[in-house]
Amino acid sequence: MPRPPRSRIRRAQPRLTRTTTFTDDGLTLIVKESVAVSGRPFVLVPGIGVASRYFGPLATALLTRGPVFVLELPGMGDAPEPRDPLPMERYGSLVARWMDASGITDAVLVGHSMGTQVVVEAALQHPAAVGHAVLIGTVTDVAEQTLPRQMLRLAQDTLRERPDVNWIVATDYLKCGPRWMLKQAPVMVAYPMLERAAELRMPVLAMRGEHDPICSEAWNRSLAEAIPVAAHHTLTGRAHVGMYVDAATPAALIVQFAGIARGVDDTREAGSDGGAVLESQAEA
């Protein structure tokens, strides 16, 4: 039996300088941050059941471009579990209030999986704080909006992810616990992503992995088409956790999309992912 890839996971983690907590009306948000570099802030919001670790390589790639804040939502990672499942509007308001209290403006708000729903809600509730939004592996596809179908897609995804990605996700799920995930998952599945995302007025990048069974190409395109100002991109050879493997490519795409002058050095990646060029853009 292969050994757990713990050392590989540790090496992939960024040098975040401190961990803080933010509490609002009984809900606690954990924030792991590095603010040593000036520039536009990047706020990374993980999905259901997972903590901050699977954002490690992406956070590292972005750290020299601006401050990075990696969140752990209530019930995930080290954040205390709420008594009841939370609507996405409440997750979004928690993140929005934290940004307001922290004085964060013109942020690049990046969400993955369920985190994309939180990003949409935070951006709708506090648009002054968000300059650009990035949605990676967005859920839930309206053509597959049932819990059994999403569980099947998640199982399929494990066959397409790298062992260290599966290890991170599995151990985070165990820490989160099946009870909370089963309480929160129906809220995630039922969330009206297309309708809510269509209300966004800042530029949005919809990104997915080529082999992601959860966020299909058709769904990702339809999402981008529903948003007034949006682009979409497919990461070659990646699955649902597409931002973990060779994170320089998604980091370069994010920097390019946000118009940040000091871009990520993606020379090595240019030949491996189509030159990291956004595939299309729609404007109202």
Image (cartoon, rainbow, N blue to C red):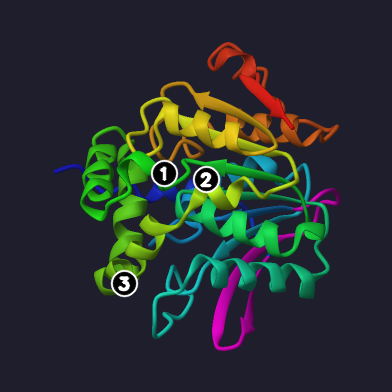
Q: Is any atom of residue 55 visible in this view?
A: no
Element under disc 2: helix
Mark 2 / mark 3, whichever is N-terminal: 3
Residue 183, label in figure: 3
Q: Position of residue 18 (x, y in %)?
A: 67, 68
**Dot 2, how many residues are within 10 Å of its Cα: few (below 14), some (14-19), or many (20+)?**
some
- In this rendering, the answer to whether 265 lies above or below 63 is above
In the picture, the quarter occupied by the N terminus is top left
Q: Position of residue 59 (x, y in %)?
A: 62, 47
Residue 194, label in figure: 2
Element under disc 3: helix
Q: Where is residue 229, by image quadrant?
A: top right
* Residue 209 lies in the magenta-colored region: no
Q: Residue furthest left?
A: 1
- By secondary structure, the bulk of the magenta-drawn segment is best described as strand
262 sits to left or right of 199:
right
* Residue 27 lies in the magenta-colored region: yes
The one of 103 and 141 positioned closer to us in this rendering: 141
Q: Label 3 near label 1: C-beta < 8 Å?
A: no
The residue mark sitting in front, 2 or 3, is 2
Query: On the image, numbered disc 1 is attached to which residue?
Result: 8
Residue range highlighted in magenta = 18-41
**Dot 1, how many residues are within 10 Å of its Cα: few (below 14), some (14-19), or many (20+)?**
few
The kind of residue tagged 2 is Leu
Q: Label 1 near label 2: C-beta < 8 Å?
A: no
The kind of residue tagged 3 is Lys
Count up the numbered dots. 3
- In this rendering, the answer to whether 142 lies above or below 96 is above
Residue drawn at 32 percent across, 67 percent down = 181
